[in-house]
Protein backbone atom coordinates (compact mmCIF):
# COMPACT_ATOMS: atom_id res chain seq x y z
CA UNK A 1 0.00 0.00 0.00
CA UNK A 2 2.86 2.36 0.87
CA UNK A 3 4.48 1.57 -2.47
CA UNK A 4 1.26 2.44 -4.29
CA UNK A 5 1.01 5.77 -2.45
CA UNK A 6 4.62 6.56 -3.33
CA UNK A 7 4.04 5.81 -7.01
CA UNK A 8 0.90 7.96 -6.99
CA UNK A 9 2.73 10.88 -5.36
CA UNK A 10 5.58 10.46 -7.82
CA UNK A 11 3.08 10.55 -10.68
CA UNK A 12 1.28 13.73 -9.61
CA UNK A 13 4.49 15.51 -8.63
CA UNK A 14 5.36 15.85 -12.31
CA UNK A 15 3.24 18.58 -13.97
CA UNK A 16 2.75 16.74 -17.26
CA UNK A 17 1.87 13.43 -15.58
CA UNK A 18 -0.47 15.23 -13.17
CA UNK A 19 -2.13 16.98 -16.10
CA UNK A 20 -2.98 13.73 -17.87
CA UNK A 21 -3.80 11.81 -14.67
CA UNK A 22 -6.28 14.30 -13.21
CA UNK A 23 -7.62 15.14 -16.64
CA UNK A 24 -8.38 11.46 -17.29
CA UNK A 25 -10.01 11.02 -13.87
CA UNK A 26 -12.26 14.06 -14.27
CA UNK A 27 -13.09 13.17 -17.89
CA UNK A 28 -14.10 9.63 -16.89
CA UNK A 29 -16.16 10.85 -13.95
CA UNK A 30 -17.95 13.40 -16.15
CA UNK A 31 -18.75 10.70 -18.70
CA UNK A 32 -20.17 8.49 -15.94
CA UNK A 33 -22.40 11.29 -14.66
CA UNK A 34 -23.68 12.06 -18.15
CA UNK A 35 -24.28 8.35 -18.78
CA UNK A 36 -26.18 8.00 -15.50
CA UNK A 37 -28.31 11.04 -16.34
CA UNK A 38 -29.09 9.70 -19.82
CA UNK A 39 -29.92 6.27 -18.38
CA UNK A 40 -32.43 7.82 -15.97
CA UNK A 41 -33.99 9.80 -18.81
CA UNK A 42 -34.19 6.66 -20.94
CA UNK A 43 -35.92 4.74 -18.13
CA UNK A 44 -38.50 7.51 -17.70
CA UNK A 45 -39.31 7.80 -21.39
CA UNK A 46 -39.40 4.02 -21.80
CA UNK A 47 -41.90 3.76 -18.94
CA UNK A 48 -44.11 6.44 -20.51
CA UNK A 49 -43.99 4.71 -23.88
CA UNK A 50 -44.97 1.40 -22.30
CA UNK A 51 -47.94 3.14 -20.68
CA UNK A 52 -49.14 4.48 -24.05
CA UNK A 53 -48.68 1.09 -25.71
CA UNK A 54 -50.74 -0.59 -23.00
CA UNK A 55 -53.54 1.94 -23.47
CA UNK A 56 -53.72 1.35 -27.25
CA UNK A 57 -53.57 -2.40 -26.81
CA UNK A 58 -56.54 -2.32 -24.44
CA UNK A 59 -58.61 -0.54 -27.10
CA UNK A 60 -57.57 -2.93 -29.84
CA UNK A 61 -58.66 -5.91 -27.81
CA UNK A 62 -62.12 -4.44 -27.25
CA UNK A 63 -61.52 -3.34 -23.68
CA UNK A 64 -63.52 -0.60 -22.01
CA UNK A 65 -62.43 2.94 -22.80
CA UNK A 66 -61.54 4.76 -19.59
CA UNK A 67 -60.73 8.42 -19.14
CA UNK A 68 -57.01 9.09 -18.66
CA UNK A 69 -54.52 11.93 -18.88
CA UNK A 70 -50.79 11.11 -19.25
CA UNK A 71 -47.87 13.47 -19.77
CA UNK A 72 -44.32 12.43 -20.65
CA UNK A 73 -41.18 13.84 -22.22
CA UNK A 74 -40.13 12.85 -25.70
CA UNK A 75 -36.90 14.84 -25.56
CA UNK A 76 -35.04 17.33 -23.42
CA UNK A 77 -37.44 20.13 -24.34
CA UNK A 78 -40.57 18.49 -25.84
CA UNK A 79 -43.53 17.09 -23.92
CA UNK A 80 -46.46 14.90 -25.01
CA UNK A 81 -49.87 14.87 -23.38
CA UNK A 82 -52.16 11.96 -24.16
CA UNK A 83 -55.79 12.24 -23.06
CA UNK A 84 -58.42 9.56 -23.47
CA UNK A 85 -62.14 10.30 -23.35
CA UNK A 86 -64.56 7.39 -23.03
CA UNK A 87 -68.23 7.71 -24.05
CA UNK A 88 -70.67 5.75 -21.91
CA UNK A 89 -74.08 6.84 -23.20
CA UNK A 90 -75.97 5.50 -26.15
CA UNK A 91 -75.85 8.88 -27.89
CA UNK A 92 -72.07 8.85 -28.34
CA UNK A 93 -72.20 11.52 -31.05
CA UNK A 94 -73.76 14.10 -28.71
CA UNK A 95 -71.47 13.06 -25.87
CA UNK A 96 -68.45 13.43 -28.18
CA UNK A 97 -69.48 16.95 -29.21
CA UNK A 98 -70.06 17.94 -25.57
CA UNK A 99 -66.71 16.63 -24.34
CA UNK A 100 -64.69 18.16 -27.16
CA UNK A 101 -66.43 21.51 -26.75
CA UNK A 102 -65.41 21.59 -23.05
CA UNK A 103 -61.74 20.94 -23.66
CA UNK A 104 -59.01 23.60 -23.57
CA UNK A 105 -58.57 23.09 -27.33
CA UNK A 106 -59.69 25.41 -30.08
CA UNK A 107 -61.86 23.77 -32.76
CA UNK A 108 -64.23 25.02 -35.38
CA UNK A 109 -67.62 23.41 -35.71
CA UNK A 110 -66.71 21.49 -38.85
CA UNK A 111 -63.78 19.83 -37.14
CA UNK A 112 -65.93 18.63 -34.24
CA UNK A 113 -68.62 17.34 -36.62
CA UNK A 114 -66.08 15.44 -38.70
CA UNK A 115 -64.70 13.81 -35.54
CA UNK A 116 -67.94 12.98 -33.83
CA UNK A 117 -70.27 12.38 -36.81
CA UNK A 118 -68.03 11.15 -39.59
CA UNK A 119 -65.54 9.53 -37.18
CA UNK A 120 -62.52 10.99 -39.00
CA UNK A 121 -59.24 11.96 -37.31
CA UNK A 122 -58.17 15.61 -37.00
CA UNK A 123 -54.73 17.20 -36.82
CA UNK A 124 -53.63 20.78 -36.16
CA UNK A 125 -52.43 23.41 -33.68
CA UNK A 126 -55.55 23.09 -31.54
CA UNK A 127 -53.65 23.49 -28.25
CA UNK A 128 -52.09 26.78 -29.37
CA UNK A 129 -49.17 28.00 -31.47
CA UNK A 130 -46.11 25.82 -31.32
CA UNK A 131 -48.07 22.63 -30.54
CA UNK A 132 -49.26 19.77 -32.66
CA UNK A 133 -52.42 17.86 -31.75
CA UNK A 134 -53.81 14.67 -33.28
CA UNK A 135 -57.28 13.34 -32.37
CA UNK A 136 -58.33 9.80 -33.29
CA UNK A 137 -61.76 8.23 -32.79
CA UNK A 138 -61.75 4.97 -30.82
CA UNK A 139 -64.05 2.48 -32.52
CA UNK A 140 -65.64 -0.71 -31.27
CA UNK A 141 -65.46 -3.96 -33.27
CA UNK A 142 -68.92 -3.00 -34.61
CA UNK A 143 -67.61 0.35 -35.83
CA UNK A 144 -69.31 2.29 -33.07
CA UNK A 145 -67.72 5.38 -31.49
CA UNK A 146 -66.56 4.56 -27.96
CA UNK A 147 -64.23 7.49 -27.30
CA UNK A 148 -61.41 9.63 -28.62
CA UNK A 149 -57.71 9.82 -27.91
CA UNK A 150 -56.02 13.23 -28.03
CA UNK A 151 -52.24 13.49 -28.35
CA UNK A 152 -50.67 16.94 -28.06
CA UNK A 153 -46.92 17.56 -28.54
CA UNK A 154 -45.53 20.87 -27.32
CA UNK A 155 -42.27 22.59 -26.55
CA UNK A 156 -41.37 23.20 -22.93
CA UNK A 157 -40.21 26.57 -21.68
CA UNK A 158 -36.70 27.66 -22.67
CA UNK A 159 -33.87 26.66 -20.33
CA UNK A 160 -32.86 29.26 -17.76
CA UNK A 161 -29.83 29.62 -15.54
CA UNK A 162 -32.02 29.01 -12.49
CA UNK A 163 -33.33 25.72 -13.88
CA UNK A 164 -29.82 24.69 -14.88
CA UNK A 165 -28.51 25.34 -11.37
CA UNK A 166 -31.35 23.27 -9.90
CA UNK A 167 -30.33 20.29 -12.04
CA UNK A 168 -28.10 17.94 -10.05
CA UNK A 169 -26.44 16.50 -13.13
CA UNK A 170 -25.68 19.97 -14.50
CA UNK A 171 -24.17 21.01 -11.18
CA UNK A 172 -22.08 17.86 -11.02
CA UNK A 173 -20.76 18.31 -14.57
CA UNK A 174 -20.00 21.96 -13.85
CA UNK A 175 -18.18 20.94 -10.65
CA UNK A 176 -16.07 18.41 -12.53
CA UNK A 177 -15.24 20.93 -15.23
CA UNK A 178 -14.34 23.51 -12.58
CA UNK A 179 -12.12 20.95 -10.86
CA UNK A 180 -10.40 20.16 -14.13
CA UNK A 181 -9.90 23.85 -14.87
CA UNK A 182 -8.54 24.39 -11.36
CA UNK A 183 -6.03 21.57 -11.76
CA UNK A 184 -4.99 22.83 -15.17
CA UNK A 185 -4.61 26.26 -13.66
CA UNK A 186 -2.43 24.81 -10.90
CA UNK A 187 -0.19 23.15 -13.46
CA UNK A 188 0.03 26.34 -15.49
CA UNK A 189 0.82 28.27 -12.32
CA UNK A 190 3.88 26.10 -11.79
CA UNK A 191 5.18 27.05 -15.23
CA UNK A 192 4.26 30.69 -14.66
CA UNK A 193 5.97 30.72 -11.27
CA UNK A 194 9.06 29.12 -12.73
CA UNK A 195 9.06 31.71 -15.52
CA UNK A 196 8.61 34.62 -13.12
CA UNK A 197 11.42 33.33 -10.91
CA UNK A 198 13.79 32.83 -13.80
CA UNK A 199 12.88 36.05 -15.63
CA UNK A 200 14.57 38.45 -13.19
CA UNK A 201 17.65 36.22 -13.14
CA UNK A 202 17.80 36.18 -16.93
CA UNK A 203 17.34 39.93 -17.08
CA UNK A 204 20.03 40.65 -14.44
CA UNK A 205 22.85 38.40 -15.56
CA UNK A 206 24.91 38.30 -18.73
CA UNK A 207 24.42 35.01 -20.58
CA UNK A 208 28.03 34.70 -21.70
CA UNK A 209 29.97 35.46 -18.51
CA UNK A 210 27.42 35.10 -15.73
CA UNK A 211 28.30 38.62 -14.54
CA UNK A 212 25.68 41.24 -13.69
CA UNK A 213 24.48 43.33 -16.60
CA UNK A 214 25.17 47.06 -16.56
CA UNK A 215 21.91 48.23 -14.92
CA UNK A 216 21.87 45.42 -12.37
CA UNK A 217 25.54 46.05 -11.57
CA UNK A 218 24.99 49.78 -10.98
CA UNK A 219 21.98 48.99 -8.79
CA UNK A 220 24.02 46.57 -6.65
CA UNK A 221 27.00 48.94 -6.42
CA UNK A 222 24.83 51.81 -5.20
CA UNK A 223 23.76 49.64 -2.27
CA UNK A 224 27.40 48.80 -1.49
CA UNK A 225 28.34 52.49 -1.52
CA UNK A 226 25.44 53.34 0.78
CA UNK A 227 26.62 50.70 3.24
CA UNK A 228 30.19 52.06 3.03
CA UNK A 229 28.87 55.53 3.84
CA UNK A 230 27.33 54.16 7.04
CA UNK A 231 30.07 51.74 8.14
CA UNK A 232 32.95 53.94 6.92
CA UNK A 233 34.64 50.78 5.64
CA UNK A 234 36.89 51.19 2.54
CA UNK A 235 35.58 50.13 -0.85
CA UNK A 236 37.48 49.89 -4.15
CA UNK A 237 36.30 49.92 -7.73
CA UNK A 238 38.07 48.21 -10.64
CA UNK A 239 37.53 48.60 -14.40
CA UNK A 240 39.08 45.99 -16.71
CA UNK A 241 39.56 45.85 -20.50
CA UNK A 242 40.90 42.93 -22.50
CA UNK A 243 43.95 44.12 -24.43
CA UNK A 244 43.68 44.16 -28.22
CA UNK A 245 40.32 42.41 -28.11
CA UNK A 246 39.63 43.35 -31.74
CA UNK A 247 42.71 41.34 -32.73
CA UNK A 248 41.40 38.42 -30.66
CA UNK A 249 38.14 38.48 -32.61
CA UNK A 250 39.93 38.88 -35.94
CA UNK A 251 42.34 36.02 -35.18
CA UNK A 252 40.09 33.52 -33.42
CA UNK A 253 36.73 34.56 -34.90
CA UNK A 254 33.67 35.68 -32.96
CA UNK A 255 33.23 32.27 -31.31
CA UNK A 256 36.87 32.41 -30.24
CA UNK A 257 36.28 35.94 -28.97
CA UNK A 258 33.36 34.70 -26.88
CA UNK A 259 35.56 31.94 -25.48
CA UNK A 260 38.19 34.54 -24.60
CA UNK A 261 35.59 36.59 -22.72
CA UNK A 262 34.45 33.53 -20.79
CA UNK A 263 38.07 32.60 -20.01
CA UNK A 264 38.91 36.05 -18.66
CA UNK A 265 35.64 36.22 -16.70
CA UNK A 266 36.33 32.85 -15.07
CA UNK A 267 39.92 33.82 -14.13
CA UNK A 268 38.76 37.09 -12.59
CA UNK A 269 36.02 35.31 -10.67
CA UNK A 270 38.56 32.89 -9.20
CA UNK A 271 41.03 35.67 -8.35
CA UNK A 272 38.71 37.69 -6.11
CA UNK A 273 36.55 36.96 -3.08
CA UNK A 274 33.02 35.65 -3.38
CA UNK A 275 31.55 38.85 -1.91
CA UNK A 276 32.92 41.01 -4.72
CA UNK A 277 30.39 42.34 -7.23
CA UNK A 278 31.19 41.44 -10.84
CA UNK A 279 29.66 43.23 -13.81
CA UNK A 280 30.02 43.22 -17.58
CA UNK A 281 29.51 46.77 -18.76
CA UNK A 282 29.60 45.86 -22.44
CA UNK A 283 31.91 44.32 -25.02
CA UNK A 284 35.19 43.38 -23.35
CA UNK A 285 34.85 45.80 -20.42
CA UNK A 286 34.35 44.40 -16.92
CA UNK A 287 33.87 46.09 -13.57
CA UNK A 288 34.45 44.73 -10.07
CA UNK A 289 33.58 46.36 -6.75
CA UNK A 290 35.54 45.23 -3.67
CA UNK A 291 33.80 46.03 -0.36
CA UNK A 292 35.78 46.24 2.90
CA UNK A 293 39.23 46.39 1.31
CA UNK A 294 41.74 49.25 1.20
CA UNK A 295 43.49 50.46 -1.94
CA UNK A 296 46.87 48.81 -1.23
CA UNK A 297 45.35 45.39 -0.61
CA UNK A 298 43.05 45.79 -3.61
CA UNK A 299 46.07 46.51 -5.78
CA UNK A 300 47.74 43.20 -4.95
CA UNK A 301 44.52 41.31 -5.60
CA UNK A 302 44.11 43.08 -8.97
CA UNK A 303 47.77 42.43 -9.81
CA UNK A 304 47.31 38.73 -9.05
CA UNK A 305 44.32 38.63 -11.37
CA UNK A 306 46.26 40.42 -14.12
CA UNK A 307 49.09 37.89 -13.91
CA UNK A 308 46.65 34.97 -14.00
CA UNK A 309 45.09 36.31 -17.19
CA UNK A 310 48.46 36.94 -18.83
CA UNK A 311 49.42 33.31 -18.18
CA UNK A 312 46.26 32.08 -19.93
CA UNK A 313 45.63 31.42 -23.60
CA UNK A 314 42.48 31.21 -25.64
CA UNK A 315 41.91 29.01 -28.68
CA UNK A 316 39.61 28.96 -31.70
CA UNK A 317 37.61 25.97 -32.88
CA UNK A 318 40.35 25.29 -35.42
CA UNK A 319 42.91 25.00 -32.63
CA UNK A 320 44.59 28.36 -33.19
CA UNK A 321 45.79 29.81 -29.85
CA UNK A 322 46.37 33.36 -28.64
CA UNK A 323 47.80 34.86 -25.47
CA UNK A 324 45.53 37.12 -23.42
CA UNK A 325 46.14 40.13 -21.20
CA UNK A 326 44.10 42.82 -19.46
CA UNK A 327 44.50 46.45 -18.45
CA UNK A 328 43.09 47.42 -15.05
CA UNK A 329 42.10 50.78 -13.56
CA UNK A 330 41.78 50.80 -9.76
CA UNK A 331 40.47 53.50 -7.39
CA UNK A 332 39.23 53.68 -3.81
CA UNK A 333 35.79 55.14 -3.17
CA UNK A 334 35.86 58.51 -1.41
CA UNK A 335 33.35 57.76 1.32
CA UNK A 336 30.42 60.20 1.42
CA UNK A 337 32.23 62.57 -0.93
CA UNK A 338 31.23 61.24 -4.35
CA UNK A 339 28.53 59.21 -6.04
CA UNK A 340 28.67 56.19 -8.31
CA UNK A 341 29.10 58.23 -11.47
CA UNK A 342 32.07 60.08 -10.06
CA UNK A 343 33.91 57.03 -8.75
CA UNK A 344 33.31 55.17 -12.04
CA UNK A 345 34.67 58.16 -13.93
CA UNK A 346 37.88 58.12 -11.84
CA UNK A 347 38.23 54.36 -12.41
CA UNK A 348 37.81 54.91 -16.15
CA UNK A 349 40.59 57.51 -16.10
CA UNK A 350 42.91 55.00 -14.39
CA UNK A 351 41.93 52.37 -16.98
CA UNK A 352 42.88 54.83 -19.74
CA UNK A 353 46.33 55.17 -18.17
CA UNK A 354 46.74 51.40 -17.92
CA UNK A 355 45.77 50.93 -21.59
CA UNK A 356 48.62 53.18 -22.68
CA UNK A 357 51.07 50.45 -21.76
CA UNK A 358 48.69 47.44 -21.71
CA UNK A 359 48.82 44.51 -19.31
CA UNK A 360 49.17 46.57 -16.16
CA UNK A 361 47.24 47.89 -13.13
CA UNK A 362 46.98 51.68 -12.78
CA UNK A 363 46.01 53.37 -9.51
Image (cartoon, grey):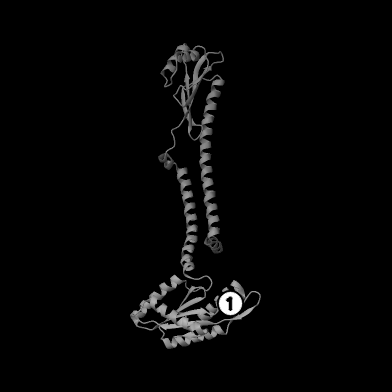
Res 347 → quadrant: bottom left
Residue 79 lies, with reference to residue 5, above or below; the image says above
User: Which residue sits at x=49%, y=77%?
Assistant: 286
User: Which residue sits at x=50%, y=13%?
Assistant: 114
Res 21 → quadrant: bottom right
**Residue 150 screen position, x and y as percent:** 49, 22
Mark 1 secondary-structure assignment: helix
Looking at the picture, tell me which residue is in the foreground, 136 or 353: 353
Q: The C terminus is located in which quarter? A: bottom left
Q: The N terminus is located in which quarter? A: bottom right
Report if residue 345 is visible in the image: yes
Report if residue 272 is visible in the image: no
**Residue 220 screen position, x and y as percent:** 41, 74
**Residue 80 screen position, x and y as percent:** 49, 28
Q: Callout 1: few (<14), some (14-19), or many (20+) C-alpha neighbours within 10 Å?
A: many
Looking at the picture, tell me which residue is in the foreground, 234 or 54: 234
Residue 26 lies, with reference to residue 97, above or below; the image says below
Residue 60 lies, with reference to residue 242, above or below; the image says above
Q: How many marks?
A: 1
**Residue 124 screen position, x and y as percent:** 49, 21
Residue 102 lies, with reference to residue 2, above or below; the image says above
Looking at the picture, tell me which residue is in the foreground, 326 or 189: 326
User: Which residue sits at x=48%, y=66%?
Assistant: 198
Specify the farthest residue to the right. 318
**Label 1 sits on residue:** 248
Amino acid sequence: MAGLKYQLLKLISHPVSAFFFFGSVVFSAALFVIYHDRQAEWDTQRHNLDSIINIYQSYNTGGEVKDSDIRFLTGDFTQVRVRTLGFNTRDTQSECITHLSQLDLTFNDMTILRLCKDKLPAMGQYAGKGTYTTIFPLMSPLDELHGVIIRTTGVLSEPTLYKTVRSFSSLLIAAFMALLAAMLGSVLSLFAKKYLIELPTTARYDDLTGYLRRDAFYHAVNKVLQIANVTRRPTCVILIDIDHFKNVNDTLGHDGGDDALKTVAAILKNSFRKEEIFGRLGGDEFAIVLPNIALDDAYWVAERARVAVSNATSASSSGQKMKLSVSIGLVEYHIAQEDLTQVMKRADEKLYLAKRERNRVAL
